[in-house]
Image: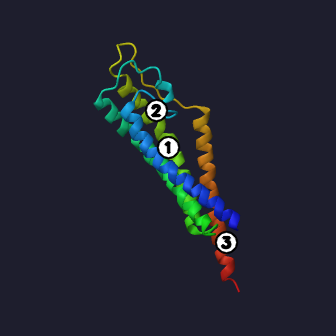
Amino acid sequence: MKKIKYVSIFFRLLFQVTFVFLIVSQIAGWTYAPKPIAIFNVIPVHYQGLVLHALDLNSKIAGFFLSSPSLIIKLIVVYSLIKLFYLYEHHEFFSHKNVLYIRNAGYALLILEIIKPVTDFFLGFILTLHNPPGFRIAMMTMSETNIGVILTSLIIILISWIMTEGRKLNDEQQLII
C-alpha cells in the first residue's frame, strides 16, 4: 500500500506541475507567437510555416481566446487526474468520486477532440489573415491520432460506467444479510 501512496503522490505532483505549465506556456506561447518557445508552439502543426508575417496584438489576443477552450478542457483532464491520484494516495480506489473523475476525464477528452478541429479552423483565419492573397488558409483536419483519442475517451467513459454499475452491485450485496 505504501508503494501505491508514493506513486500516487508522484503522479499528483507531476499533474499539478503540468497544470501550471499548460497555463504559463499558453500565455507565453501567444505572447511570442508565431515563434515557438523551446519545445512548445501554440501555432497548430498544420499552420506552422504558413504564417508569413509577424502577428499583431489583435491577432495574438484572438488566437489566445480561440485556443482557450482547448486549454480549459485540457486543464479539466489534468485536474481530474490530480483529484484521482489524491484519492489513490488516500487509499480510495472504487469510490463514487473515483468514477466521477475518470468519467469527467473521458468526456473532456472526447469534447477536446470534437472542438479542436473547429478551433483550429478559425485559428487558420486569424493566423493567415494578413498573408498575401492566395496564401490565406483555414483547414479542418482529422487524423488517426484524433480518432485514437476519441476511441480512448469512449473506452474511458465505458469503464467509468462499468465501475458505476459494479459499485451499485457491490452496494446491493452488502445490504443483503
Q: Residues within 10 Å of mark 1 (few under 14, many from 20)?
A: many
Three-letter code, disc 2 = Ile
Q: Residues within 10 Å of mark 3 (few under 14, many from 20)?
A: few
The label number, if any, that marks residue 25 in the structure image? none
Closer to the camera in the image, 2 or 67? 2
- Tell me if residue 77 can be seen: no
Q: Which residue is mark 3?
A: 169
Please provide percent x and percent y for residue 150: 58, 43
The label number, if any, that marks residue 112 in the structure image? 1
Drawn side of residue 41 relative to residue 56, left or right: right
Which element is circle 3 on?
Answer: helix
Displayed quadrant of residue 172: bottom right
Q: Residue at x 55, y 32 (%)?
A: 142
The span from disc 2 to disc 3 (Cα, nearest Å) is 51 Å
Q: Which residue is mark 2?
A: 37
Drawn side of residue 109 relative to residue 51, left or right: right
Please provide percent x and percent y for residue 71: 44, 44
Closer to the camera in the image, 70 or 162? 70
Figure quadrant of the C terminus: bottom right
Drawn side of residue 51 relative to residue 164, left or right: left
- In this rendering, which labeled residue sits more in front, label 3 or label 1? 1
Closer to the camera in the image, 161 or 3? 3
Q: Residues within 10 Å of mark 2 (few under 14, many from 20)?
A: some
Label 3 near label 2: C-beta < 8 Å?
Answer: no
Please provide percent x and percent y for residue 28: 40, 38
Three-letter code, disc 1 = Leu
Q: Earlier in the sequence, mark 2 or mark 1?
A: 2
